[in-house]
Image: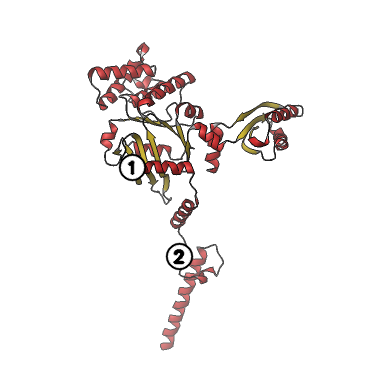
């Protein structure tokens, strides 16, 4: 009987070891016997790997001097408890919890920013960079995961009710009542800003005139019958009524014709004299026209900050050749570019149109012109241009490489 029990125990131990072995090997792509080197070391789960990777990325990443200086400014303002700055954000973060087994999404990562009254700050970044998530936090739609932010010295986590009376918002998508007229919208929002009587009526009239929705009875037409451009102009007017101290504009000129866009820019530029404005846009022309400073965001992080001229000087340092040919001559263009400068770099390519970046110190403009004119004898050049670095070039470079 003792021998039977001994055999059973031995078989049980062997089965246990075999089961453990199979489990370890099937869950690992490493060497078959690698687990024996440290049999008690757990295999990293996807969540552990994600966290470790994020922590590693953060530790390796070197923040730019301009971003560090902005953080120092924020720390000083918070230490002084200054109320002169319209908007102050300190290490603001937003993490959306993952669903259906997906890992958490870090939308805004440690943003520190100070925007004084009288400044329009432009937020540039690809889709999904965290711009709208930031505005949603600042307007009280979602709560920050960590960090703090102040509007006119008021904490957005504790004093949001007080913040609302001095804040204007133009959301990315128009939020209008289809049955209310343009005038009724402004009367409603004007009352929310504590405007009454003559002051309210005057503010409504001035707002409608500023966005060309006053004359011809347009103000008394239900918003549901407005065109897309008219709805957008009404949304901007709503955000500015009552002379708010802080204004958030999420792509305000989307869908406007050129004339309406320029008029709207004039309205925004006039409004910023007495307010701190944060504006998101995909239009580099709009950013240069309106914004005193710009920040480029990639993956929830502020990559660089400065006025348009500073950013072009810092990340420019080059000329850009844009040339369009038929697809079969694209290789000829690349050969041409390499003959002019061996250090030229392709930065854009689509459907026969290519962009190349030339170091300024290596080329003469006359040489490029001569090379292109000579190339025209060998193949057809549909269009070409040679220019200094534009804000769009800077944006593409930073968004792609995070330089």
Which residue position holds label 2? 42
Quadrant location, the C terminus: top right
Q: Answer with the quarter of the image where residue 348 lies.
A: top right
- Give the left or right position of residue 318, taking residue 402 as reference: right
Give the mark nearer the N terminus: 1 vs 2: 2
Q: Position of residue 367 (x, y in %)?
A: 71, 30
- Indicate which disc residue 128 carries: none
Give coordinates of residue 149: x percent, y percent. 34, 41
Q: Nearer the viewer, residue 101 or 60?
A: 60
Q: Is residue 243 above or below residue 83?
A: above
- Say above or below: 25 vs 269: below
- Which residue is at the front of the view, 374 or 36? 374
Q: Which residue is mark 1?
A: 78
Q: Nearer the viewer, residue 62 or 3?
A: 62
x and y percentages locating residue 82 in the rendered image: 32, 38
Q: SS of the residue at dot 1?
A: helix
Image position of 12 with respect to 324: above or below: below
Residue 92 lies, with reference to residue 43, above or below; the image says above
SS of the residue at dot 2? Answer: loop
Q: Is residue 328 visible?
A: no
Q: Is residue 343 visible?
A: yes
Q: Which residue is rendered at x = 66% and y = 30% of the image?
A: 323
Quarter where residue 243 is shown: top left
């Amino acid at each position: 009987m003792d021998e039977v029990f001994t055999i059973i125990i031995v078989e049980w131990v062997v089965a246990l070891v075999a089961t453990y072995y199979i489990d370890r090997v099937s869950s690992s792509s490493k060497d078959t016997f690698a687990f024996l080197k440290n049999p008690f070391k757990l295999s990293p789960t996807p969540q552990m790997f994600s966290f470790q990777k994020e922590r590693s990325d953060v530790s390796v990443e070197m923040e730019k001097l301009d971003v560090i200086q902005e953080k120092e400014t924020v720390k000083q303002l918070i230490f002084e408890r200054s109320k002169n700055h319209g908007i102050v954000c300190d290490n603001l973060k937003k993490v959306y919890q993952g669903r259906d087994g997906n890992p958490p999404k870090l939308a805004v990562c440690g943003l520190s920013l100070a925007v004084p009254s009288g400044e329009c700050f432009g937020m540039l970044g690809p889709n999904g960079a965290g711009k709208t998530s930031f505005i949603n936090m600042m307007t009280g739609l979602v709560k920050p995961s960590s960090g703090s932010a102040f509007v006119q010295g008021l904490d957005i986590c504790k004093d949001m009710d007080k913040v609302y009376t001095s804040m204007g918002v133009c959301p990315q998508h128009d939020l209008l009542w289809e049955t209310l007229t343009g005038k009724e919208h402004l009367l409603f929002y004007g009352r929310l800003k504590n405007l009454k009587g003559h002051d309210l009526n005057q503010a409504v009239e001035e707002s409608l005139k500023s966005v060309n929705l006053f004359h011809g009875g347009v103000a008394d037409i239900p918003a549901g019958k407005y065109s897309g451009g008219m709805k957008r102009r009404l949304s901007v007017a709503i955000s500015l009524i009552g002379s708010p101290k802080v204004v958030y504009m999420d792509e305000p000129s989307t869908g406007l014709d050129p004339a309406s866009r320029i008029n709207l820019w004039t309205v925004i530029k006039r409004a910023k004299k007495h307010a701190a404005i944060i504006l998101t846009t995909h239009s580099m022309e709009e950013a240069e026209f309106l914004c005193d400073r710009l920040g480029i965001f990639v993956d929830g992080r502020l990559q660089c900050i400065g006025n348009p001229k500073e950013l072009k000087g810092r990340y420019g340092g080059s000329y850009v050749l844009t040339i369009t040919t038929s697809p079969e001559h694209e290789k000829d263009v690349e050969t041409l570019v390499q003959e002019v400068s061996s250090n030229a770099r392709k930065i854009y390519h689509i459907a026969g149109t290519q962009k190349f970046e030339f170091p300024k110190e290596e080329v003469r403009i006359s040489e490029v012109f001569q090379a292109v004119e000579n190339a025209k004898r060998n193949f057809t050049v549909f269009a070409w241009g040679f220019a200094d670095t534009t804000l769009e070039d800077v944006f593409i470079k930073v968004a792609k490489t995070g330089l």
